[in-house]
Amino acid sequence: MRAQDTLMFTEAASAAEVVLNQLAANRPMAEALGQRLRDKPPTAVLITGRGSSDNAGVYARYLIETRTGVLVSAAAPSVSSVYAKTPLLEGAVCIAISQSGKSPDLVASVEAAKAGGAYVVALVNVEDSPLARVADAVLPLRAGPEKSVAATKTFIASLSAAAQLVACWLQDAELLAALDALPDQMEAAWDTDWSEALGELVAATDLYVVGRGLGYGVAREASLKFKETAGLHAEAFSAAEVRHGPMALVKSGFPVMMLSQDDDTREDIVALADDFAARGAKVVLAGGQAARSVTVLPTVSAKAELEPILLIQSFYKLAAQVSVARGYDPDRPPYLNKVTDTV
């Protein structure tokens, strides 16, 4: 098997076209939602999702909080689906992110949020799903069928949908223009060569993936993909949190992958990469420059809010290669299904 013959590889490669079509088709809906959010500013935003969609929610949280100042929290679906409690969310907005829109606990949490007074926005790929029917407004991901169990294009489509929503909410012409340029930049990101990291990752047994701020969600997603598709025990940390205990494990030979967008967090990421390298860790850095002993991967520059999308696009190509090189089929992770029926 070759990585380029897998569904994961081909579906991830199609993400630029997905985003191009999505942004054009969704613009009127995103503008209408933006108007609604300006007319009725939310008291808070609740974000709910599972797996890769939860990771997309982390990106959305940082984007909304840093750009609007509105408090954002991650939902705990079991509060509604298991404990049968209805949250008090009058004046809040609930953003639900899902590929299938079918997970029972996700739907239950959204129903409870709506009953508690929230206005529900669904970022969902299946437009006739239970989640879409519950929502007050839908921004379709428009990724088309995703046959590989490991989500790629739907994750990226979730990020671009969140970015367009925020751009229209704020009427941010600069961010909207950057979104127009994003599909071409994604093509360039897919063409970048991250194979220099392949040897270290194929041989690894444990791994940290580190990001911060807007990039933390894609660090979590990269960690999840290593677990799902390559049987590699990878843990995601923010560059701040890893210093509070987990850094004790980073000694000579320990592999660390770091993802950095070009914003106020970069200096901290680069300093941490240098610190890891000084301990003898095998550091791979995407974004920025660090010590000579750090493997620096090529990246594509964009508006900082959108660079995490380009980082994960480059990463997915590498992830498929790592999976196959480690003897796995990235399209059929063991013990996993496309739709996970958690309750």
Image: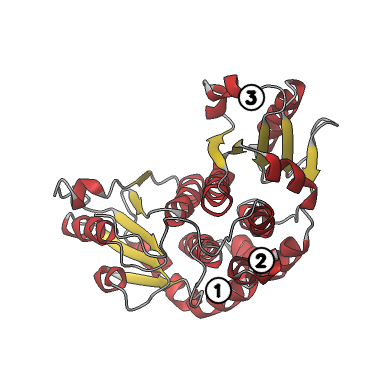
Say if residue 203 shows up in the picture. Answer: yes
Query: Mark 2 and 1 residues: CB-CB less than 8 Å, in contact?
Result: yes
Answer few, some or many: residues within 10 Å of disc 2's Cα (few below 14, many 20 plus, some between 14 and 19): many
Instruction: Identify which residue is drawn at 59% across, 70% down.
Output: 7
Q: How many marks?
A: 3
Q: Is residue 49 left or right of residue 173?
A: left
Residue 284: which quarter of the image?
A: top right
Query: Mark 1 and 3 residues: CB-CB less than 8 Å, in contact?
Result: no
Answer few, some or many: residues within 10 Å of disc 1's Cα (few below 14, many 20 plus, some between 14 and 19): many
Instruction: Identify which residue is drawn at 42% across, 55% down.
Output: 335
Mark 2 or mark 1: whose residue is earlier in sequence? 1
Q: Is residue 66 left or right of residue 1?
A: left
Q: Which residue is mark 3?
A: 250
Q: Position of residue 43 (x, y in %)?
A: 31, 49
Depth check, mark 1 against mark 3: the one in front is 3
Q: Nearer the viewer, residue 143 or 31?
A: 143
Q: Position of residue 201 (x, y in %)?
A: 69, 43
Q: Is residue 310 left or right of residue 106?
A: right
Q: CA distance from mark 2 to mark 1?
A: 10 Å
Q: Quadrant of the N terminus?
A: bottom right
